[in-house]
Amino acid sequence: MEKKPFERPLIKRLNAGMPSKFGMHTHIEALTEIDGLKVEDLVAEHGSPLYVLSERILRKTYRDAYNVFSTRYPRVQFAWSYKTNYLDAVCNVFHQEGAWAEVVSGFEYEKAVRNGVPGSRIIFNGPDKQEEDLKLAIQNGSLIHIDHFDELYLLLELAEKGTGKPKVAIRINMDTGIYPQWDRFGFNYENGEAWEALNRILLSEKMELVGLHTHIGTYILTADAYRIAASKLAILATGIERKYGKVIRYIDIGGGFASKNTLKGAYIPGTDAAPSFEEYADAVSSALIKSDIKPENLPLLVLETGRALVDDAGFLLGTVLANKRLADGRRATIADIGVNLLFTSFWYQHEVLPAQEVSQHTEDTTLYGPLCMNIDVIRDAIDFPLLKKGDHIVIKRIGAYNMTQWLQFITYRPRVVMIDESGKVHVIREREDLEHLIRLERIPAHLKSDDARKK
Ligand SMILES: *Cc1c(COP(=O)(O)O)cnc(C)c1O
Protein backbone atom coordinates (compact mmCIF):
# COMPACT_ATOMS: atom_id res chain seq x y z
CA MET A 1 0.00 0.00 0.00
CA GLU A 2 1.25 3.45 -0.86
CA LYS A 3 2.33 5.61 2.06
CA LYS A 4 -0.08 8.52 2.59
CA PRO A 5 1.51 11.98 2.72
CA PHE A 6 1.60 13.65 6.12
CA GLU A 7 -0.84 16.50 6.64
CA ARG A 8 -0.53 18.68 9.70
CA PRO A 9 -3.52 18.49 12.03
CA LEU A 10 -5.77 21.50 12.26
CA ILE A 11 -8.92 22.59 14.02
CA LYS A 12 -11.28 24.24 11.61
CA ARG A 13 -14.34 26.39 11.85
CA LEU A 14 -16.73 26.00 8.94
CA ASN A 15 -17.04 29.33 7.24
CA ALA A 16 -16.48 28.65 3.55
CA GLY A 17 -19.50 29.16 1.35
CA MET A 18 -23.07 29.42 2.57
CA PRO A 19 -24.70 26.50 4.34
CA SER A 20 -28.21 25.77 3.12
CA LYS A 21 -30.85 24.30 5.39
CA PHE A 22 -29.39 20.90 4.56
CA GLY A 23 -26.10 21.98 6.12
CA MET A 24 -22.69 22.09 4.54
CA HIS A 25 -21.64 19.42 2.14
CA THR A 26 -18.13 18.73 3.31
CA HIS A 27 -17.41 15.29 1.95
CA ILE A 28 -15.38 15.76 -1.19
CA GLU A 29 -15.22 12.99 -3.75
CA ALA A 30 -12.41 12.88 -6.24
CA LEU A 31 -13.30 12.69 -9.91
CA THR A 32 -10.48 10.58 -11.26
CA GLU A 33 -12.05 9.41 -14.52
CA ILE A 34 -14.27 10.73 -17.27
CA ASP A 35 -16.10 8.06 -19.25
CA GLY A 36 -13.61 5.50 -17.99
CA LEU A 37 -10.51 7.49 -18.95
CA LYS A 38 -8.10 8.71 -16.30
CA VAL A 39 -7.94 12.48 -15.94
CA GLU A 40 -4.22 12.10 -15.35
CA ASP A 41 -3.74 10.32 -18.70
CA LEU A 42 -5.90 12.83 -20.59
CA VAL A 43 -3.82 15.72 -19.30
CA ALA A 44 -0.53 13.89 -19.93
CA GLU A 45 -1.54 13.26 -23.53
CA HIS A 46 -3.29 16.52 -24.44
CA GLY A 47 -1.89 19.13 -22.07
CA SER A 48 -3.33 21.22 -19.29
CA PRO A 49 -5.71 22.96 -19.16
CA LEU A 50 -7.93 20.75 -21.29
CA TYR A 51 -11.59 20.88 -22.28
CA VAL A 52 -13.23 17.46 -22.44
CA LEU A 53 -16.62 16.71 -23.96
CA SER A 54 -18.39 13.42 -23.45
CA GLU A 55 -20.24 12.30 -26.57
CA ARG A 56 -22.06 9.76 -24.41
CA ILE A 57 -23.48 12.45 -22.12
CA LEU A 58 -24.32 14.74 -25.06
CA ARG A 59 -26.37 12.03 -26.76
CA LYS A 60 -27.94 10.78 -23.57
CA THR A 61 -29.06 14.25 -22.50
CA TYR A 62 -30.46 14.97 -25.95
CA ARG A 63 -32.37 11.67 -26.07
CA ASP A 64 -33.73 12.16 -22.56
CA ALA A 65 -35.00 15.62 -23.46
CA TYR A 66 -36.45 14.46 -26.78
CA ASN A 67 -38.21 11.48 -25.21
CA VAL A 68 -39.68 13.57 -22.43
CA PHE A 69 -41.13 16.13 -24.85
CA SER A 70 -42.23 13.74 -27.59
CA THR A 71 -44.12 11.52 -25.15
CA ARG A 72 -46.11 14.57 -24.04
CA TYR A 73 -46.69 16.35 -27.31
CA PRO A 74 -47.23 14.80 -30.74
CA ARG A 75 -44.75 16.79 -32.84
CA VAL A 76 -41.46 17.99 -31.40
CA GLN A 77 -38.34 19.42 -33.02
CA PHE A 78 -35.15 20.59 -31.32
CA ALA A 79 -32.93 23.22 -32.97
CA TRP A 80 -29.39 23.37 -31.61
CA SER A 81 -28.49 26.82 -30.28
CA TYR A 82 -25.12 27.44 -31.96
CA LYS A 83 -23.97 30.21 -29.65
CA THR A 84 -24.14 27.84 -26.67
CA ASN A 85 -21.40 25.69 -28.19
CA TYR A 86 -20.60 25.91 -31.88
CA LEU A 87 -17.65 23.57 -32.08
CA ASP A 88 -18.47 21.57 -35.21
CA ALA A 89 -18.11 18.20 -33.48
CA VAL A 90 -20.70 19.20 -30.88
CA CYS A 91 -23.11 20.61 -33.49
CA ASN A 92 -22.75 17.46 -35.56
CA VAL A 93 -23.61 15.20 -32.63
CA PHE A 94 -26.86 17.12 -32.19
CA HIS A 95 -27.55 17.22 -35.95
CA GLN A 96 -27.01 13.46 -36.12
CA GLU A 97 -29.54 13.11 -33.31
CA GLY A 98 -31.99 15.04 -35.46
CA ALA A 99 -31.64 18.63 -34.26
CA TRP A 100 -32.00 21.56 -36.64
CA ALA A 101 -29.70 24.59 -36.24
CA GLU A 102 -30.60 27.80 -34.43
CA VAL A 103 -28.23 30.65 -35.29
CA VAL A 104 -28.00 34.33 -34.34
CA SER A 105 -25.48 35.76 -36.79
CA GLY A 106 -24.18 35.51 -40.34
CA PHE A 107 -21.12 33.68 -39.00
CA GLU A 108 -23.21 31.06 -37.21
CA TYR A 109 -25.42 30.74 -40.29
CA GLU A 110 -22.35 29.99 -42.43
CA LYS A 111 -21.21 27.43 -39.88
CA ALA A 112 -24.56 25.63 -39.96
CA VAL A 113 -24.54 25.53 -43.78
CA ARG A 114 -21.00 24.18 -43.71
CA ASN A 115 -22.11 21.50 -41.26
CA GLY A 116 -24.51 20.34 -43.95
CA VAL A 117 -27.74 21.51 -42.34
CA PRO A 118 -30.32 22.07 -45.10
CA GLY A 119 -31.39 25.73 -45.33
CA SER A 120 -34.98 24.86 -44.46
CA ARG A 121 -33.77 23.50 -41.10
CA ILE A 122 -31.91 26.61 -40.04
CA ILE A 123 -33.66 29.04 -37.72
CA PHE A 124 -32.20 32.51 -38.03
CA ASN A 125 -32.66 34.56 -34.85
CA GLY A 126 -31.19 37.72 -33.41
CA PRO A 127 -31.28 41.49 -33.88
CA ASP A 128 -28.24 41.61 -36.18
CA LYS A 129 -29.00 40.04 -39.53
CA GLN A 130 -27.19 41.84 -42.33
CA GLU A 131 -28.84 42.34 -45.71
CA GLU A 132 -26.49 39.79 -47.31
CA ASP A 133 -27.32 37.26 -44.59
CA LEU A 134 -31.03 37.78 -45.12
CA LYS A 135 -30.74 37.36 -48.91
CA LEU A 136 -28.96 34.06 -48.41
CA ALA A 137 -31.48 32.92 -45.82
CA ILE A 138 -34.38 33.77 -48.15
CA GLN A 139 -32.80 31.92 -51.06
CA ASN A 140 -32.13 28.89 -48.86
CA GLY A 141 -35.68 28.84 -47.52
CA SER A 142 -34.49 29.27 -43.93
CA LEU A 143 -36.79 30.24 -41.09
CA ILE A 144 -36.22 33.92 -40.39
CA HIS A 145 -37.38 35.08 -36.97
CA ILE A 146 -37.96 38.80 -37.24
CA ASP A 147 -36.69 40.84 -34.29
CA HIS A 148 -37.84 44.41 -35.04
CA PHE A 149 -39.80 46.53 -37.54
CA ASP A 150 -36.67 47.70 -39.38
CA GLU A 151 -35.91 44.09 -40.19
CA LEU A 152 -39.50 43.50 -41.22
CA TYR A 153 -39.33 46.44 -43.67
CA LEU A 154 -35.99 45.27 -45.04
CA LEU A 155 -37.43 41.82 -45.67
CA LEU A 156 -40.43 43.36 -47.47
CA GLU A 157 -38.03 45.38 -49.59
CA LEU A 158 -35.98 42.29 -50.48
CA ALA A 159 -39.17 40.38 -51.29
CA GLU A 160 -40.31 43.25 -53.58
CA LYS A 161 -36.96 43.13 -55.37
CA GLY A 162 -37.54 39.50 -56.19
CA THR A 163 -35.07 37.85 -53.81
CA GLY A 164 -37.80 35.32 -53.04
CA LYS A 165 -40.63 34.87 -50.60
CA PRO A 166 -39.19 34.93 -47.08
CA LYS A 167 -40.38 32.26 -44.65
CA VAL A 168 -40.80 34.15 -41.43
CA ALA A 169 -41.84 33.99 -37.81
CA ILE A 170 -41.76 36.84 -35.35
CA ARG A 171 -40.03 36.81 -32.02
CA ILE A 172 -42.40 37.84 -29.25
CA ASN A 173 -41.47 39.08 -25.79
CA MET A 174 -43.99 38.96 -23.01
CA ASP A 175 -44.67 38.98 -19.31
CA THR A 176 -44.27 35.42 -18.04
CA GLY A 177 -43.63 36.35 -14.43
CA ILE A 178 -39.86 36.36 -14.97
CA TYR A 179 -38.23 39.67 -14.09
CA PRO A 180 -36.40 41.61 -15.33
CA GLN A 181 -38.46 40.92 -18.43
CA TRP A 182 -36.46 40.38 -21.61
CA ASP A 183 -38.28 42.99 -23.68
CA ARG A 184 -35.41 44.10 -25.89
CA PHE A 185 -35.80 41.27 -28.38
CA GLY A 186 -38.76 40.92 -30.68
CA PHE A 187 -42.23 42.44 -30.47
CA ASN A 188 -44.15 42.88 -27.26
CA TYR A 189 -47.24 40.79 -26.63
CA GLU A 190 -49.05 42.86 -24.02
CA ASN A 191 -48.85 46.25 -25.75
CA GLY A 192 -50.13 44.95 -29.09
CA GLU A 193 -46.88 45.34 -30.99
CA ALA A 194 -46.79 41.62 -31.80
CA TRP A 195 -50.22 41.84 -33.44
CA GLU A 196 -49.14 44.94 -35.31
CA ALA A 197 -46.19 43.04 -36.81
CA LEU A 198 -48.36 40.02 -37.63
CA ASN A 199 -50.95 42.21 -39.38
CA ARG A 200 -48.27 43.81 -41.54
CA ILE A 201 -46.81 40.47 -42.52
CA LEU A 202 -50.14 38.86 -43.32
CA LEU A 203 -51.55 41.86 -45.18
CA SER A 204 -48.44 42.29 -47.33
CA GLU A 205 -48.67 38.74 -48.74
CA LYS A 206 -44.99 39.09 -49.66
CA MET A 207 -43.84 36.84 -46.87
CA GLU A 208 -44.97 33.48 -45.64
CA LEU A 209 -45.73 33.47 -41.94
CA VAL A 210 -44.77 30.02 -40.71
CA GLY A 211 -44.28 30.31 -36.97
CA LEU A 212 -44.36 32.19 -33.70
CA HIS A 213 -41.28 32.41 -31.51
CA THR A 214 -40.31 33.45 -28.03
CA HIS A 215 -37.19 33.05 -25.92
CA ILE A 216 -38.13 34.31 -22.49
CA GLY A 217 -34.68 34.34 -20.91
CA THR A 218 -32.02 31.96 -19.74
CA TYR A 219 -31.57 29.71 -16.70
CA ILE A 220 -35.30 29.96 -15.97
CA LEU A 221 -36.00 28.12 -12.73
CA THR A 222 -39.80 28.09 -12.98
CA ALA A 223 -41.47 25.78 -15.45
CA ASP A 224 -44.66 27.79 -15.07
CA ALA A 225 -43.15 30.67 -17.09
CA TYR A 226 -43.16 28.32 -20.08
CA ARG A 227 -46.81 27.47 -19.54
CA ILE A 228 -47.62 31.18 -19.71
CA ALA A 229 -45.41 31.70 -22.77
CA ALA A 230 -46.92 28.75 -24.65
CA SER A 231 -50.46 29.87 -23.79
CA LYS A 232 -49.84 33.39 -25.07
CA LEU A 233 -48.37 32.11 -28.34
CA ALA A 234 -51.34 29.75 -28.69
CA ILE A 235 -53.73 32.68 -28.24
CA LEU A 236 -51.94 34.51 -31.06
CA ALA A 237 -52.05 31.42 -33.27
CA THR A 238 -55.79 31.06 -32.70
CA GLY A 239 -56.32 34.76 -33.42
CA ILE A 240 -54.36 34.51 -36.68
CA GLU A 241 -56.46 31.58 -37.82
CA ARG A 242 -59.68 33.35 -36.91
CA LYS A 243 -58.77 36.61 -38.66
CA TYR A 244 -56.78 35.39 -41.66
CA GLY A 245 -57.69 31.70 -41.96
CA LYS A 246 -53.98 31.05 -41.71
CA VAL A 247 -52.68 28.02 -39.82
CA ILE A 248 -49.41 28.51 -37.94
CA ARG A 249 -47.03 25.63 -38.67
CA TYR A 250 -44.86 25.85 -35.56
CA ILE A 251 -44.59 27.39 -32.15
CA ASP A 252 -41.01 27.89 -31.02
CA ILE A 253 -40.67 28.22 -27.28
CA GLY A 254 -36.95 29.11 -27.39
CA GLY A 255 -34.33 27.99 -24.91
CA GLY A 256 -33.61 28.94 -21.33
CA PHE A 257 -34.09 25.71 -19.39
CA ALA A 258 -31.78 25.78 -16.38
CA SER A 259 -28.81 23.43 -16.27
CA LYS A 260 -27.79 21.82 -12.99
CA ASN A 261 -25.17 24.45 -12.20
CA THR A 262 -25.57 26.53 -9.05
CA LEU A 263 -25.90 30.29 -9.39
CA LYS A 264 -23.68 32.45 -7.20
CA GLY A 265 -25.40 33.24 -3.94
CA ALA A 266 -28.06 30.58 -4.52
CA TYR A 267 -29.42 28.97 -1.38
CA ILE A 268 -30.13 25.59 -2.92
CA PRO A 269 -27.73 23.81 -5.28
CA GLY A 270 -28.67 23.70 -8.96
CA THR A 271 -28.96 19.93 -8.86
CA ASP A 272 -31.98 20.43 -6.56
CA ALA A 273 -33.25 23.79 -7.82
CA ALA A 274 -33.41 23.25 -11.58
CA PRO A 275 -36.71 21.85 -12.87
CA SER A 276 -36.49 18.56 -14.75
CA PHE A 277 -37.21 18.24 -18.47
CA GLU A 278 -40.47 16.57 -17.37
CA GLU A 279 -41.61 19.69 -15.52
CA TYR A 280 -40.82 21.99 -18.45
CA ALA A 281 -42.45 19.57 -20.91
CA ASP A 282 -45.61 19.18 -18.82
CA ALA A 283 -45.97 22.96 -18.66
CA VAL A 284 -45.51 23.59 -22.39
CA SER A 285 -47.42 20.62 -23.74
CA SER A 286 -50.45 21.04 -21.51
CA ALA A 287 -50.67 24.74 -22.39
CA LEU A 288 -50.69 23.95 -26.12
CA ILE A 289 -53.04 20.99 -25.89
CA LYS A 290 -55.47 22.91 -23.66
CA SER A 291 -55.48 25.95 -25.95
CA ASP A 292 -58.17 26.74 -28.52
CA ILE A 293 -55.97 25.57 -31.40
CA LYS A 294 -57.88 22.89 -33.30
CA PRO A 295 -56.41 19.41 -32.84
CA GLU A 296 -55.81 19.00 -36.58
CA ASN A 297 -53.89 22.29 -36.58
CA LEU A 298 -51.67 21.63 -33.57
CA PRO A 299 -48.36 23.22 -34.51
CA LEU A 300 -44.94 21.61 -34.44
CA LEU A 301 -43.31 22.43 -31.10
CA VAL A 302 -39.79 23.77 -31.65
CA LEU A 303 -37.29 23.94 -28.78
CA GLU A 304 -34.03 25.86 -28.87
CA THR A 305 -32.65 24.37 -25.66
CA GLY A 306 -28.99 25.30 -25.23
CA ARG A 307 -27.32 25.07 -21.85
CA ALA A 308 -29.51 22.29 -20.45
CA LEU A 309 -28.42 20.00 -23.31
CA VAL A 310 -24.68 20.60 -23.23
CA ASP A 311 -23.55 21.81 -19.81
CA ASP A 312 -23.24 18.39 -18.17
CA ALA A 313 -21.20 16.96 -21.05
CA GLY A 314 -18.34 19.44 -20.62
CA PHE A 315 -15.41 19.17 -18.18
CA LEU A 316 -12.46 21.50 -17.76
CA LEU A 317 -9.29 19.83 -16.52
CA GLY A 318 -6.47 21.77 -14.93
CA THR A 319 -3.35 21.56 -12.83
CA VAL A 320 -2.38 23.14 -9.54
CA LEU A 321 0.48 25.61 -10.02
CA ALA A 322 1.07 26.67 -6.42
CA ASN A 323 -0.35 27.14 -2.96
CA LYS A 324 0.07 30.17 -0.77
CA ARG A 325 -1.32 31.89 2.30
CA LEU A 326 -3.18 35.15 1.90
CA ALA A 327 -2.51 38.05 4.25
CA ASP A 328 -5.37 36.94 6.51
CA GLY A 329 -4.01 33.41 6.72
CA ARG A 330 -6.47 31.84 4.34
CA ARG A 331 -5.29 29.24 1.91
CA ALA A 332 -5.01 30.13 -1.77
CA THR A 333 -4.57 27.56 -4.50
CA ILE A 334 -3.50 28.72 -7.94
CA ALA A 335 -4.43 26.60 -10.93
CA ASP A 336 -3.85 26.99 -14.65
CA ILE A 337 -7.53 27.66 -15.44
CA GLY A 338 -8.26 31.36 -15.80
CA VAL A 339 -11.63 33.09 -16.00
CA ASN A 340 -10.88 33.67 -19.68
CA LEU A 341 -11.43 29.92 -20.15
CA LEU A 342 -14.34 29.77 -17.75
CA PHE A 343 -16.54 32.71 -18.54
CA THR A 344 -19.43 31.16 -16.65
CA SER A 345 -17.48 31.43 -13.37
CA PHE A 346 -18.77 35.02 -13.21
CA TRP A 347 -22.26 33.74 -12.41
CA TYR A 348 -21.94 30.09 -11.42
CA GLN A 349 -20.41 28.52 -8.35
CA HIS A 350 -18.83 25.80 -10.43
CA GLU A 351 -18.27 22.45 -8.82
CA VAL A 352 -14.51 21.90 -8.64
CA LEU A 353 -13.23 18.45 -7.75
CA PRO A 354 -9.79 17.01 -7.15
CA ALA A 355 -8.75 14.48 -9.79
CA GLN A 356 -6.90 12.21 -7.38
CA GLU A 357 -7.90 10.59 -4.13
CA VAL A 358 -7.64 13.09 -1.30
CA SER A 359 -8.02 12.90 2.44
CA GLN A 360 -11.14 14.41 3.97
CA HIS A 361 -8.93 17.07 5.46
CA THR A 362 -10.30 20.28 4.00
CA GLU A 363 -9.76 23.96 4.49
CA ASP A 364 -11.35 27.25 3.46
CA THR A 365 -9.66 27.87 0.12
CA THR A 366 -9.82 30.42 -2.66
CA LEU A 367 -9.09 28.98 -6.06
CA TYR A 368 -7.32 31.43 -8.35
CA GLY A 369 -6.51 31.24 -12.04
CA PRO A 370 -3.10 32.02 -13.57
CA LEU A 371 -3.86 35.44 -15.05
CA CYS A 372 -2.16 38.57 -13.76
CA MET A 373 -5.53 40.03 -12.91
CA ASN A 374 -7.18 40.40 -9.56
CA ILE A 375 -10.54 39.27 -10.96
CA ASP A 376 -9.13 35.89 -11.87
CA VAL A 377 -10.97 33.88 -9.23
CA ILE A 378 -12.47 30.52 -10.12
CA ARG A 379 -14.05 29.94 -6.69
CA ASP A 380 -13.77 32.02 -3.58
CA ALA A 381 -14.27 30.40 -0.21
CA ILE A 382 -14.70 26.74 -0.95
CA ASP A 383 -14.10 24.02 1.52
CA PHE A 384 -11.39 22.19 -0.37
CA PRO A 385 -8.79 19.49 0.28
CA LEU A 386 -5.13 20.32 0.27
CA LEU A 387 -3.79 19.79 -3.21
CA LYS A 388 -0.15 20.12 -4.10
CA LYS A 389 1.64 21.52 -7.11
CA GLY A 390 1.10 19.24 -10.08
CA ASP A 391 -2.19 17.77 -8.79
CA HIS A 392 -5.12 17.93 -11.16
CA ILE A 393 -8.58 19.38 -10.76
CA VAL A 394 -11.78 18.93 -12.74
CA ILE A 395 -14.43 21.59 -13.13
CA LYS A 396 -17.82 20.09 -13.90
CA ARG A 397 -20.70 21.26 -16.09
CA ILE A 398 -18.85 23.68 -18.30
CA GLY A 399 -20.20 22.59 -21.72
CA ALA A 400 -22.40 25.65 -22.25
CA TYR A 401 -21.07 29.03 -23.40
CA ASN A 402 -17.44 28.57 -22.28
CA MET A 403 -16.22 27.27 -25.64
CA THR A 404 -17.81 30.21 -27.44
CA GLN A 405 -17.30 33.08 -25.00
CA TRP A 406 -13.71 32.17 -24.12
CA LEU A 407 -11.11 34.86 -24.55
CA GLN A 408 -7.65 34.45 -25.91
CA PHE A 409 -5.79 36.36 -23.24
CA ILE A 410 -2.18 36.16 -22.03
CA THR A 411 -1.87 32.56 -23.14
CA TYR A 412 -3.17 30.18 -25.79
CA ARG A 413 -6.57 28.61 -25.63
CA PRO A 414 -6.06 24.91 -24.96
CA ARG A 415 -7.13 21.79 -26.79
CA VAL A 416 -10.65 20.50 -26.77
CA VAL A 417 -11.15 16.76 -26.96
CA MET A 418 -14.26 14.63 -27.30
CA ILE A 419 -14.49 11.14 -25.85
CA ASP A 420 -16.63 9.05 -28.19
CA GLU A 421 -19.02 6.36 -27.01
CA SER A 422 -16.37 3.65 -27.33
CA GLY A 423 -13.94 5.59 -25.16
CA LYS A 424 -11.75 6.84 -27.99
CA VAL A 425 -10.43 10.38 -27.62
CA HIS A 426 -10.63 12.80 -30.57
CA VAL A 427 -9.05 16.23 -30.71
CA ILE A 428 -11.91 18.49 -31.86
CA ARG A 429 -10.06 21.78 -31.56
CA GLU A 430 -6.29 22.16 -31.47
CA ARG A 431 -4.45 24.24 -28.93
CA GLU A 432 -3.75 27.65 -30.40
CA ASP A 433 -0.21 28.58 -31.35
CA LEU A 434 1.70 31.70 -32.30
CA GLU A 435 1.16 31.14 -36.03
CA HIS A 436 -2.59 30.98 -35.54
CA LEU A 437 -2.68 34.15 -33.49
CA ILE A 438 -0.42 36.33 -35.63
CA ARG A 439 -1.96 35.21 -38.91
CA LEU A 440 -4.38 38.14 -38.84
CA GLU A 441 -1.87 40.74 -37.70
CA ARG A 442 -0.27 43.22 -40.12
CA ILE A 443 2.85 45.25 -39.35
CA PRO A 444 3.09 48.66 -41.07
CA ALA A 445 6.26 48.89 -43.21
CA HIS A 446 7.89 51.63 -41.11
CA LEU A 447 7.71 49.38 -38.05
CA LYS A 448 9.20 46.40 -39.78
CA SER A 449 12.80 47.26 -40.49
CA ASP A 450 15.70 47.04 -38.13
CA ASP A 451 15.93 50.84 -38.44
CA ALA A 452 12.70 51.20 -36.57
CA ARG A 453 14.13 49.25 -33.68
CA LYS A 454 17.23 51.42 -33.53
CA LYS A 455 15.43 54.74 -33.40
C1 LIG B 1 -29.17 31.83 -26.48
C2 LIG B 1 -30.44 31.44 -27.10
C3 LIG B 1 -30.97 30.15 -26.93
C4 LIG B 1 -30.36 29.14 -26.00
O1 LIG B 1 -30.56 29.53 -24.67
P1 LIG B 1 -30.20 28.61 -23.42
O2 LIG B 1 -30.49 29.49 -22.26
O3 LIG B 1 -28.76 28.25 -23.52
O4 LIG B 1 -31.09 27.41 -23.46
C5 LIG B 1 -32.13 29.83 -27.63
N1 LIG B 1 -32.74 30.73 -28.41
C6 LIG B 1 -32.28 31.99 -28.59
C7 LIG B 1 -32.99 32.92 -29.47
C8 LIG B 1 -31.12 32.38 -27.94
O5 LIG B 1 -30.68 33.64 -28.09
Image (cartoon, rainbow, N blue to C red):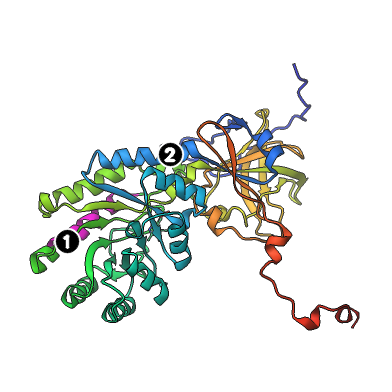
The quadrant in which residue 387 appears is: top right
Does any portion of residue 259 appear in the rendered image?
A: no
Does any portion of residue 118 appear in the rendered image?
A: yes
Q: Are marks 1 and 2 in contact (CB under 8 Å)?
A: no
Residue type pointed to by label 1: Ala
Element on which disc 1 rests: helix
**Foreground: 312 or 346?**
312
Percent x, y for residue 373?
70, 61
Dominant SS of magenta comes to: helix
Is ligand 1 less than 8 Å from the beta carbon at label 1?
no
Q: Residue at x 72, y 61 (%)?
A: 435
What range is drawn magenta here? 222-238
The quadrant in which residue 161 appears is: bottom left
Element on which disc 2 rests: helix
Question: Residue lying furthest top in this view?
Answer: 1
Q: Residue at x 59, y 53 (%)?
A: 342
Q: Judge whether residue 439 is colored magenta.
A: no
Q: As displayed, is residue 452 above or below residue 165?
A: below
Ligand 1 resides in the quarter of the picture at: bottom left
Q: Which mark is residue 59?
A: 2
CA gap between label 1 and label 2 equals 33 Å
Q: Residue at x 45, y 54 (%)?
A: 115
Q: As displayed, is residue 176 above or below residue 449?
A: above
Percent x, y for residue 94?
42, 46
Residue type pointed to by label 2: Arg
**Foreground: 168 or 199?**
168
- In the picture of the structure, the residue carrying the numbered disc 1 is 237
Label 2: few (<14), some or many (≥20) within 10 Å? Answer: some
